[in-house]
Image: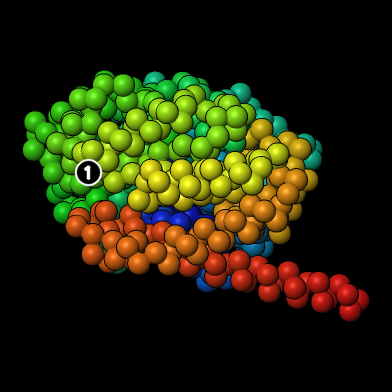
Amino acid sequence: MNVLLVVPSTDTCYERVPSMGLMNLYLIGKELGCNMELVDLTEVSYGKGLKKILSKQYDIIGISCNFTNSAPNCMRYAKDIKEKYPDTLAISGGNHATLVPEDLLFNNYDFIIYGEGEITFKNFLERRLFNKAVEDLKGICYLKEGKIVKNKRQDLMECLDSLPVNDYSEFNLELYFKRSGLRYISLETSRGCPYNCAFCSTVRMWGHQYRHKSPKRVVQEFKIAQELNLEFIFIEDDDTALDEQNLRDFCQLLIDENVSVPWGMGIGSASIKEESTFDLLVRSGCVKVNVNIESANQRIMELYRKPYSIEDNRRLCWNLRKRGILIHNHGIVGFQDETIRETLNTYFYLIKTSPIWHVSILEPRPGSDYWENWEGQGDVFQYRLFGKANVILGKHKIIPYVLYRIFALFYFSNPIRIWRALYSKGKGVRYSYRIQYFVAYNTLKQNIINYIRHFNLFLIKRNG
C-alpha cells in the first residue's frame, strides 16, 4: 500500500524543522510494511506543491492541518487530488483538523484522525491493508449522509517510550539544515497539560493527562542527535518542567553519559521549584528557555487562567539570567477590555526581563474560549490573517494593532539585537536571535500580499 504524508504549503513559515508528528506516522507505516513517503511543502507554493502530490498515485494521502493559517490550502488539497485520483483516500489530522473537522470533511476529505494520532493511524493502516472497514475505529471523524460522525476518542498512549525511535536515516535533514543555517531539530519529551488556559487548544488536542518519556529514552534521542553532529535541540513540549524530577533525572543522565548537544526548552513560570535544578540545566547543556508569561497584568493573567503570578516569572528570570541561560519571554496583548496602560505594561516588562521576547495579539484559536463566538469560522480569508497580528478581538482594535508594529520596529532595529543575531557565542543562541528576523520578514511579506489581495477584491466588488 502506497501512502504519502504531506506537510502543507503555508503562507507564513515560522521554523525550518522537520515535522515530529508526521515522522512518527511515517515510521509506524514503515513497520507495517507500507510504502511510505513524506513531503514537506511548507515553503513551496500551493501549485508547485500540488504538482508534487499528483506526480504519482497513492492509496492514501495524509495531510497535516495543524495551524489555522495553513487550513486554507489544506481545504483545497482533497478536491484537487480526487479530480485526478478519485479512488485515493484523503485523510487529515493535527490541531485544526481535530478541532474544526468540518472545514476538511466538507471539502472532500474522507476521514479525520483527531487528537493523538499514532494508535489510530496504525489501526487505520492495518484495516486498509486487509480491506477492512475503518468506520468503527476510535479517534476518527467522517461524513455519513451529509452529517459528521465523530467516533469515541482514542485512548491516550500510556507510555510515550513506545513511540518509534527516530534515527533520521529515513529522512533528509540536510535540506532543513541548509535552509536554517543550523544543524537543528525539535524533540518531544512529553504531552498533555494539567492546566486550562483560556486562549490555548492544547488540552483539547492532547488532554489534561500529562505524560512524559523516560529520562533514558530522552537521552537516547540526544545521543542520536550527537551522532548526527547537531548543533542545537529544542524541546517543543508545552512545559518540559511540569514533572521537575523527570527533568532533573534526564539532565543528570545527560551529564553522566557525557552527551553534549546545546539545547533549549519551554517551561511555565512556576514549574521549577528547586534552585539546584537551574544548575543542572547549565551543566547538561541547556542554553535557552522559553517562558509564556502572556501578560504583566495580574488581572488579565487571571482571566487567561494562567497558573502562576508575575512574581513567579521574575524569580524564574532572575535564576536563569544569573546562570547565563538565554530567556525568551512571550506575551499576548489585545484582550477584549485590555487598556493601553495594561498593553504597555506587558511590553515594558518583556523588554526589562528578557533579551529575546515576542508578543502575539490574542486570536480566537480553535479550542480556545474565544473560538465559539468568533464570526470568522470557516472563512478562508479570515484564516489567512492568523499568525500575523491581524485578528483582533478587543473593542479598541486599532490600539494593539499600532502598538504591536511600533514595538516590533523598536525590537528589530535595535543594533545590539542585530549584533547578537550575527555574532553571539553559540550557534543555537545566535539562531534564536536570527530566526525572529526570518519570521518577521515572512510575516511582513505575507501581510503585504494579503493587503494587495484584499484591495483587489475591493476594487472588483466596487466595479461590479
Left or right of 250 in this view: 399? right
Amino acid under disc 1: Gly
Q: Is residue 120 visible in this depiction of the protein?
A: no
**Label 1 crowding class (10 Å Cα cut-off): few <14, some 14-19, many 20+?**
few
Question: Number of labelled discs?
Answer: 1
Q: Give the residue drawn at x 82%, y 77%.
A: 459
Snapshot quadrant of residue 27: top left
Residue 332 in sight here: yes
Q: Position of residue 185 (x, y in %)?
A: 30, 50
Q: How is the image coloured?
A: rainbow
Q: Residue furthest front?
A: 341
Along the viewing direction, whichever of 389 and 103 lies nearer the viewer: 389
Secondary structure of the residue carrying numbered label 1: loop
**383 vs 164: above or below:** below
> Residue 15: image x %, image y %?
41, 56
Picture quarter with the C terminus: bottom right
Q: Nearer the viewer, residue 430 or 111?
A: 430
Most extreme residue toward the bottom is 463
The residue tagged 1 is 324
What residue do we see at 20% from left, 46% from top? 262
For the residue pair 58 and 229, the one nearer the viewer reads as 229
Position of residue 140 measured from the top left corner of the image (x, y, whole percent): 59, 33
Residue 401: where, in percent of width, then height? 64, 56
- At x 45% / y 57%, what residue is drawn? 14
Image side of residue 198 versus residue 430, left or right: right
